[in-house]
Amino acid sequence: RTPAFCGALASSAACKARPAVAAAWRWGAEARCRHRCARDNARGRCQTISVPQRRSTIAGVQNAEIGDRAENGEASQEVLPETLEDGIAILWFRDDLRLADNRTVQLACTAQAVLPVYVFDPANFGASQTSYGFQNMGPFKAYFIHEAVSALRLALRNCRSDLYTFIASADTTLAELIEPFLQYEMPIYVVAEDGISCNARSEQRRVQRALADAGLVPPDRFILVPHNNCTLPLMLEQASVLELSSMTLDRFRAVAMSADNSPAALPAPEDFPPIPEPAPRAGKLPLLRDELQIEGTCEPLNWPFPDPKACFAFQGGEEFARERLDVYLWRQRAISVYERDRKYMGSAQTSTKLSPSLSVGCISAARLFRELRRYEKRTGPSEDARLMFDNLLMRDVLRAQAWARARKHEADAGGSRATENAEDDETDEDELSDEDDEMVERWIEGITGFPFIDACMRELKATGFLTFDARRAVASFLLHVVKVSDYRVGAQYFRSVLIDYDEAVNEHYWALAASSPPLDLFGLALEVDPDGWYTAGWCPELVDVPAPSIWALETLTPEERSAYDLDLGFSYPLPMLNDFGEYVPFDAPPPSVPT
């Protein structure tokens, strides 16, 4: 949003004199900033004086944080530029929907002008399916992203900028946005987070190739910021791809927990650079069902209906995530019993409930790490905090390993088209038999006849969330009890329904469940739901059955079944597998009742 004269100049015949237009455009941007600062100084709000001063401040922060590269050995990751002060930046938000602790925002704000953009590509939501027929994203995560984008737009408007949203593919959208800015003969940069998932990397390569082929943005100005949503991004950036691919939790913990490795805070910019002219229309937020083709939304709200039994009301946005962290860590001090209570199900206070916010970048892992460090300094080291540190660092390890594997695969397979080829490889799955397909459908619907598994799957379908132990339980059941041969069936269903889906974490734990011995599901149910109230809450037909009988219905006598008003095969389904592991159809007659 440059001054009016600059917009008029850009639309006049004087556009042919592009150097003069560019100079006038720069002058207009600085004049606008001086006008803002004069106004805000009168209100006691502004600490900046001009565009160059603001730019040098941010560049100084980056220089202090990035430091020098390792002297020994060649750097295997691209070195990010320190400043973009000579050009226009297209700030492409992806899974980093926040302003604070965001390196893409800090880098983009060093440019003369910034255009913040978020693209709702229907192919990344419900318009396409996985190889087993599940939609790419379910209603819970889609609505969470919808809220997070709305909150980000409000935050940018408070910084005198805006968020421009589009419902289309990213390659065509960014090309159409960039083309009018070529009149200024200034470098145009695209700044975005470097993706980790297969879909994200395929998308960014497709966009990079399209912009380069059209002569809009050369590859060296398409800047991808790696590890932007990790605890120690700068440390990971300095490691080689080989080191990241073989990194373990113990090695990473030893480095991360050293006294001098606390990540520095990157505050949100108080005032964004101007928006370049001609500015596009800000755009509207899409309808989940009609425009993103998300299945599972309710009429006429067009978002998933909140279940009253949900353990927590998730909400997208940076402000909500920071408030939730403050409540959990400082007001309620719930972390003090984290090790004891984290296994219990159905409660809002057993964990931070920040996994959805971390998955789309509403809050940075670095901020959570700093707050945990601050908590330890005040209260002293504790097993509860250490356990949460390990969970946070393990997430970083899995994401770093996935990123390094993707980079290595792209290099080995021929660069930009490697990710698309990797997606094609995923279609080589085994065909499910009709019987397996029916058992998977009953597993999804929570009518397996195994009460604890049914309760977990019903909660997952109704809320998009499960605790870690519940996810382990349903994965072990599908792979070792139902004996589905391909773990990707469960992994892809989780992708379609989880509100906090993270591809690196999800793929790791499903592969781990497939290669691990089966869990003792009865013992796990006793541990995480000792009173049986969680199971009875999600399976109300069993509300009168006490624990532990609620997890072993076949052991009940006829008198007990009558007393509990339980009619197996009618009021509650029979187990879909008998004692010999054979499938029992849903409409099979009930067996004789033991005496």
Image: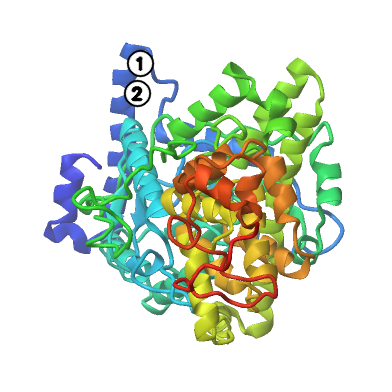
Residue at 87% x, 58% y: name it.
72
Which amino acid does the dot numbered 1 rest on? Asn
Q: Quadrant of residue 123?
A: bottom left
Q: Nearer the viewer, residue 97 or 535?
A: 535
Residue 272 in the image, given as x and y percentages of width and height: 38, 37
- Residue 408 in the image: above or below residue 274: below
Residue at 70% x, 55% y: name it.
521
| Residue 105 visible in the displayed image | no
Circle 2 sits in a helix, a strand or a loop, which is it? Answer: helix
Q: Quadrant of residue 505?
A: bottom right
**Residue 41 disc label:** 1
| Residue 213 visible in the displayed image | yes
Circle 1 sits in a helix, a strand or a loop, which is it? Answer: helix
Q: Are marks 2 and 1 in contact (CB under 8 Å)?
A: yes
Q: Please name the colour scheme applied to the rendered image.
A: rainbow
Which residue was labeled with disc 2?
Answer: 37
Q: Is residue 66 left or right of residue 353?
A: right
Residue 209 in the image, given as x and y percentages of width and height: 45, 76
Residue 154 in the image, given as x and y percentages of width and height: 32, 36
Assess disc 2: are there few (<14), some (14-19) or many (≥20) residues with their C-alpha within 10 Å of its C-alpha.
Answer: many
Q: Is residue 28 left or right of residue 422?
A: left
Which amino acid does the dot numbered 2 rest on? Cys
For the N terminus, give its image quadrant.
Answer: top left
